[in-house]
Amino acid sequence: MERKNHTHLSLEERRKIFLLVNSKTPVKLIAELLCRHHSTIYRELARNTTYHEDPYLRGYFHMNADHFMRQRRQRLKRLYRMPALKDYVIDRLRAYWSPEQIAGHMKQQDGMKYYACAETIYQHVYSDEGRDSGLYHYLFRGRPRRRRQYSRKPHDRVPAHHGIAFRPEIVNSRATFGHWEGDLMIFDRSYGKVNLTSLIERRSRYTILAKNVNRKPVPVISTIRDRLKKLPAYGRQTITFDRGFEFMSYPLLHRDLGMDSYFCDPQAPWQKGAVESNNNRIRRFLPRETNLAALSDADLYEVCVIMNNTPRKCLGFRTPQEVLDEHLHDQAMVIN
């Protein structure tokens, strides 16, 4: 069946959904019978189901669902009820004012007969009418879809005892070998999801680079494990990450290598400054617009060779390779 163009569900459609749901019809079949996308039906049931402690009053009822919809539309349609206000808001948006600036300016005007808060303006920008008019183009970010509120707020998946405050003091002093920092380097998205794991040993500044096909935690951590397992145990004692999702399979490092993982405080990448600084050096050879997928492991190894054989002032102008060899009892080891 051909699906309908984008229109709101009618009361008659809601009545059919009510009858089909009560007859235990699967949601995807309901969608087919109504010529709707199945996500439309799932969304309708999620938003307009009645929840009540009495089981006889609990469920999806078409009259209640239609009432809930009208209540939401009435709350969100302030600009539709006031055409002059809507015209003013659209005019200011097209002058590249932000919703906050528009709302704040209106509040300061004594003669202003109407007012809309910033949230109301955002809701209009991302309504069907606002998107059709391209109003989001005039916002600072210019995103066609509104990001869910608080979606950027980091979710703390790291136990407290893995925080950087619990990292041994000897790591901070750089007095011993075997303490690493890790990061993920992102490249132009037009080339796909391929990215680069960047590792640096804190005392020697020895660099390891490894390519990943995506940012999934298990493959990323597995790649780190495979690179570091070539070192003796005292050469892989701890590693410090930021709180990115890609490092959340860190227990694999302790299970397979005996390494302890620690994490920077939220939004504090400077706490692993060695790898952050090293990434800036690497960008000279691998700028963000590099097609990483087209590079071989041999190409990345050449970059590592340059990095590890360049004298560093912090090492007394010795090279990371020289310092590494000293700590490995002069037995040169090929890690990459």
Image (cartoon, grey):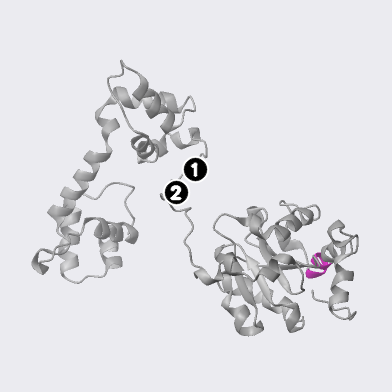
Q: Amino acid at mark 1?
A: Arg
In the displayed structure image, the side of residue 37 where residue 166 appears, left or right: right
Residue 132 against residue 217 in the figure, above or below: above
Residue 318 against residue 4 in the figure, above or below: below
Q: Is residue 275 magenta?
A: no
Magenta-tinted stretch: 297-301
Which of the pair 279/273 is nearer the observer?
A: 273
Which residue lies at the image location 89% right of the left edge and 64% below the top edge? 319
Which residue lies at the image location 77% right of the left edge and 63% below the top edge? 295
Badge 2 is on which residue? 147
Is residue 26 at least partly visible in the picture?
yes
Quarter of the image with the N terminus in it: bottom left
Within 10 Å of the Cα at label 2, are there few (<14), some (14-19), or many (20+) other Cα atoms? few
Query: Of helix, strand and loop, which one carries label 2?
Result: loop
Rendering coords of residue 24 (x, y %): 20, 72
Badge 1 is on which residue? 143
